[in-house]
Image (cartoon, helix red, strand yellow):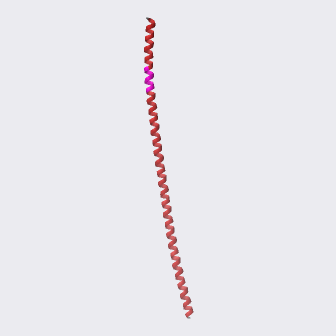
Amino acid sequence: MEILILLVGVLLGSGGVLAVHLQQRKVRDNLLAQKEEQMQHRLQSAEEKALIANREIELKVQAERLRIQEEVENKFKEQDRELERQKRRLDKREEQLDRKFDHLDHC
């Protein structure tokens, strides 16, 4: 009978150890799942921040490109206006010279 009580005690003790081990394993697995979820969240957050930063850079580059394009276009327009002024001055000078030559031809 003592052996039976001893066996029941050993079995109950083993069952208790097994239950504690299984509980610890469950807790460890839950902690691991939580850590993995946190890491996934951090990774997703980092990816979103990288996308936002990339878009901001693209917008800055586009704005700078437009600024440079406007600057170049303004310089071309200014050069065109200057060339037009010079052309008018030359046309006026040519007319003056033509009148002088006409006047000299008639004299």
Where does residue 11 sit, x and y in percent of width and height?
55, 86
Number of labelled discs? 0
Residue projecting furthest to the top: 107
Where does residue 41 sit, x and y in percent of width and height?
48, 61
- Residue 17 magenta-drawn? no
Residue at the location (51% across, 68% down)? 32
Secondary structure mostly taken by the magenta-highlighted segment of the chain: helix
The relative height of residue 3 versus residue 43 in the rendered view (above or below) is below
Residue at the location (44% across, 36% down)? 71
**In which quadrant is the C terminus drawn?**
top left
Residue at the location (48% across, 64% down)? 38
Where does residue 105 sit, x and y in percent of width and height?
46, 7
- Residue 87 magenta-drawn? yes
Where does residue 51 sit, x and y in percent of width and height?
49, 52
Question: Magenta segment, which residues?
Answer: 82-89
The relative height of residue 93 versus residue 62 in the rendered view (above or below) is above
**In which quadrant is the N terminus drawn?**
bottom right
Residue at the location (50% across, 62% down)? 40
